[in-house]
Amino acid sequence: MSRGNRKKEFRSRKARRYNKQDDLPSTMQDLAIRDEDEECSKFKVNFPVAMWDLGHCDPKKCTGRKLARKGMIKTLRLQQRFNGIVLSPMGIKCISPMDKEIVERFGAAVVDCSWAKIEETPFEQMKTSNPRLLPFLVAANPVNYGKPIKLSCVEALAALFYITGKLFDCFQEEAEHYLSQFSWGDSFINVNQEALDRYAACKDGEEVVMAQNAYLAACDEERNRRNLTPEIESSSESSEDDEPT
């Protein structure tokens, strides 16, 4: 082999080696994704989980889209009927443990839409006999962290599973499994633990509303107490200073 050919062969081998090294990160990422998909496929939910996707949200941030890509949620068409529990502003009842059997038989669904476009969302085209409202909860997702009510799809589903099933020792694994698909998922239960436990201990939707009102009143009382504490301490210190020595 001539000197020129040997140089070409050396450069070719070097290029192939660098290409293999460049492929390592993407290969590792593919393996991680494959492991996640295998984990999802091992966990079976024994009832339908669905959503109506209005296409309002950024696909990269949308929890519903991610669940759909993983095969964990089915996308419904407008006008398509869903016989399970549907979390929707069209509901007049609050979700409660009384809805457990409906979830077991027919499943659970959410509406994937933007909170900024809630007024123009065609909820009337999402056919269901069981629309429900969620009680007061606080978002833990990165987009709306700490904001009341503004839950993502996965948070809404997890809340539904937790509230309807905890009293009967069911659906808790489903709630944890769906939240576990997101790095921040555990925060949702942690942030709302007290409220979720109150709601899950109720008998029906009316009791959930009462529990919600009691929880909000307790939060207001605690907030007022914290705001008054510095003033009380300051007043106490002033009184001590005024005492004769």
Image: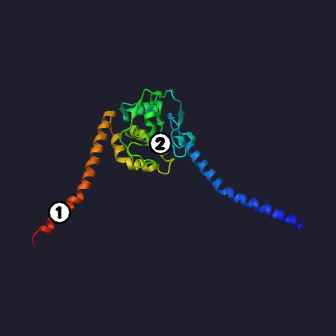
Determine the residue located farthest toward the left in the rendered image: 244
Query: Where 42 sits versus 235, above or below?
Result: above
Q: Count the marks.
A: 2
**Upstream in sequence: badge 2 or badge 1:** 2
Give the amino acid type for the residue marked by disc 2 in the picture: Val
Quick check: 139 above or below 99? below
Residue 22, percent across and down? 68, 58
Q: Quadrant of residue 232?
A: bottom left
Residue 136 coordinates in the image, percent (x, y): 35, 41
Quarter occupied by the N terminus: bottom right
What distance separates the C-alpha of mark 2 from that of mark 1? 49 Å
The residue at the point 54 percent across, 41 percent down is 65
Residue placed under numbered mark 2 in the picture:
154
Q: Residue at x 34, y 40 (%)?
A: 199
Residue 148 x, y percent position in the rendering: 37, 44
Disc 1: which residue? 236
Near mark 2 (Cα within 10 A), the count class, few <14, some 14-19 or many ≥20, is many
Spot occupied by residue 127 in the image (x, y as percentages of width and height): 47, 27
Which mark is on residue 6? none
Q: Quadrant of the C terminus?
A: bottom left
Question: Which callout, 2 or 1, points to the residue nearer the camera?
Answer: 1
Q: Secondary structure at mark 2?
A: helix
In the rendered structure, which amino acid carries the disc numbered 1?
Answer: Ser
The one of 94 and 36 positioned closer to us in this rendering: 94
